[in-house]
Image (cartoon, rainbow, N blue to C red):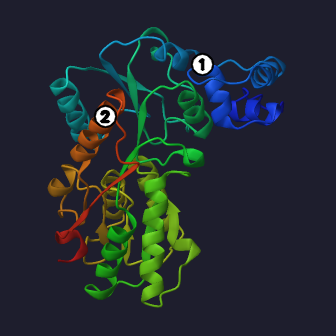
Amino acid sequence: MASKITAPTIDDVARQAGVSISTVSRVLNRTVPVSDEIVAKVQAAMRDLRYTPRAAARTLATARTNTLGLVLAELVGDFFSPLLHGIESVAVQNGYDLLISTAGRRGPHNQLPHSFDKHNADGLLIFAGCLNDDGVRDIHSLGVPMVLLHQMPPDNLPIPCVTIENKAATRALVEHLIVRHQRTRILLLTGEPGNEDGYWREMGYREALERYNLPTRAELIAPGHFDRRIAQATMERILRERISFDAVFTGDDEAAVGVYAALRAASLRIPEDVAVVGFDDQSLAQVLQPALTTVHVPIKQVGIQATHSLIQLLQGKQPEALTLLPTTMILRSSCGC
């Protein structure tokens, strides 16, 4: 099979020219004086590598439209409704329109969706899982204001990030299962590979087990990907393989729907046979039967804070580099409470 050819990135240009990424950025933006010698080196590296800054990002850097751009992997599930409401409310209050584009769930991309080739935005809100580090670097190199949601910037670039507290909340939730309900074989459904929320939730899970001297068992860590269909398929496989467990941390509430379906199909009772807990406190958590114990995430506030941060950038101000919003455990009957 032929190997996949990847487009050169700003990192490649910097390495070829023997300069820093920020120097390449200054040459591209022409906002800070750079010596003729350095400009020549960078331009030669760009020619040799056939590097062209992403067309969509360059379009964004050329005009002002009173429009904010939001890039999501997809628009499905209950999670995104409060997020969009928060973003739109702040945008409208400040006289901005909102342009939404989806990148698709085939993993992070290295460039913006094509919709931004034709439509300008003054700044971008980038949700986790949409752009990989190369894509983020390229857009930043062109001076496009942006704020990342649930994703830290690469290489300590000065890009504001708004996210939530994951690890301590998950640790408390798993400890609740251990101490209050005497569950000792707790199955973890992980997020998608590379997802930062999923990573910190797994760290919280591992810390809780370690605190109570419970082993971390490889067979009790399985993919859920924050997706009800994947979670259901994973649960069905685990049940077929007769892996022993007495509780499930589903990763998020969306995955919990699939877990419920698989357990019911196997005639297992929640919480009598298997305790189940989620994360996010989506609207569906209260209507599941039994109601889902979960962690409340201020989803709307994430959208509000991220949009405020982006508008601050557009006004020439410097918002907080990292906004970490608190989360709260919500106890309902699915864990046995």
| Residue 228, percent from left and from top | 38, 49
**Left or right side of 66 for 121:** right
**Left or right side of 194 for 182:** left
Q: Secondary structure at mark 2?
A: helix
Amino acid at circle 1: Arg
Q: Is residue 170 above or below residue 96?
A: below
| Residue 53, percent from left and from top | 63, 20
Q: For residue 276, what is the image quadrant?
A: bottom left
Q: Earlier in the sequence, mark 1 or mark 2?
A: 1
User: Residue, x 34% and y 42% (percent of image)?
Assistant: 319
Residue furthest toward the bottom?
A: 213
- Residue under label 1, please give it: 30
User: Residue, x 27% and y 40% (percent of image)?
Assistant: 303
Q: Nearer the viewer, mark 1 or mark 2?
A: 1
Q: CA distance from mark 1 to mark 2?
A: 23 Å
Q: Is residue 103 above or below residue 175?
A: above
Residue furthest toward the top?
A: 118
- Residue under label 2, please give it: 312
| Residue 255, percent from left and from top | 36, 54
